[in-house]
Image (cartoon, rainbow, N blue to C red):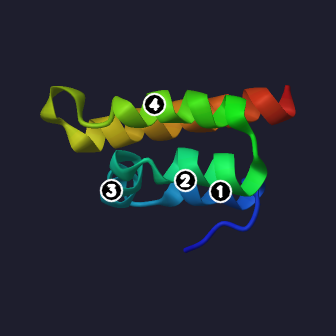
Amino acid sequence: QVARNLAEFRRALLVADPDVVSQHAERGDFSKWLRGAFRDFALARTVRALEKRIGENGDLNNGADRFRAEAVRALEERYLG
């Protein structure tokens, strides 16, 4: 699934399988997309920091769930105030 805007990204992130979230986060795909497609460098930096934490303590699923929650929160704070 490809998100075409930030609302679609948020929705997709909320329902995506943890393995998919982990794979994309480990490659830095989310922050690259935010930086490249939206030129939102501040949000991309925040998300990149979250991506780097995926798999801490060897638990990718919990890492993915934590990433998902924190990335959605960062997106909402930035755009929904």
What residue sits 36% from the left and 42% below the top? 64
Q: Marks 2/1: CA distance? A: 6 Å
Q: What residue type is labelled 4?
A: Leu
**Residue 13 badge:** 2
Residue 62 appearing in the image = yes
Q: Out of 13 and 35, give the one closest to the viewer.
A: 35
Q: Marks 3/4: CA distance? A: 13 Å
**Residue 50 badge:** 4
Q: Out of 16 and 58, give the one closest to the viewer.
A: 58
Q: Out of 44 and 12, give the one closest to the viewer.
A: 44
Local packing at callout 2 (Cα closer than 10 Å; few below 14, some 14-19, many 20+) is: many
Give the number of marks.
Answer: 4
Q: Marks 3/2: CA distance? A: 13 Å
Q: Marks 1/3: CA distance? A: 16 Å
Q: Answer yes or no: do the residues labelled 4 and 2 have beta carbons within 8 Å? A: no
Sooner in the amino-acid sequence: mark 4 or mark 1? 1
Q: Residue 60, how many percent across, how many down?
A: 24, 42
Sooner in the amino-acid sequence: mark 4 or mark 2? 2
Q: Marks 4/1: CA distance? A: 16 Å
Q: Answer yes or no: do the residues labelled 2 and 1 have beta carbons within 8 Å? A: yes
Q: What element carries label 1?
A: helix
Q: Marks 4/2: CA distance? A: 14 Å
Q: Answer yes or no: do the residues labelled 3 and 4 have beta carbons within 8 Å? A: no
List the residue tagged with mark 3: 23
Above or below, 18 relative to 2: above
Q: Is mark 4 on a helix, strand or loop?
A: helix
Q: What element carries label 3?
A: helix
Q: Which amino acid does label 2 sit on?
A: Leu
Report the quarter where the C terminus lies: top right
Sooner in the amino-acid sequence: mark 1 or mark 3? 1
List the residue tagged with mark 1: 9
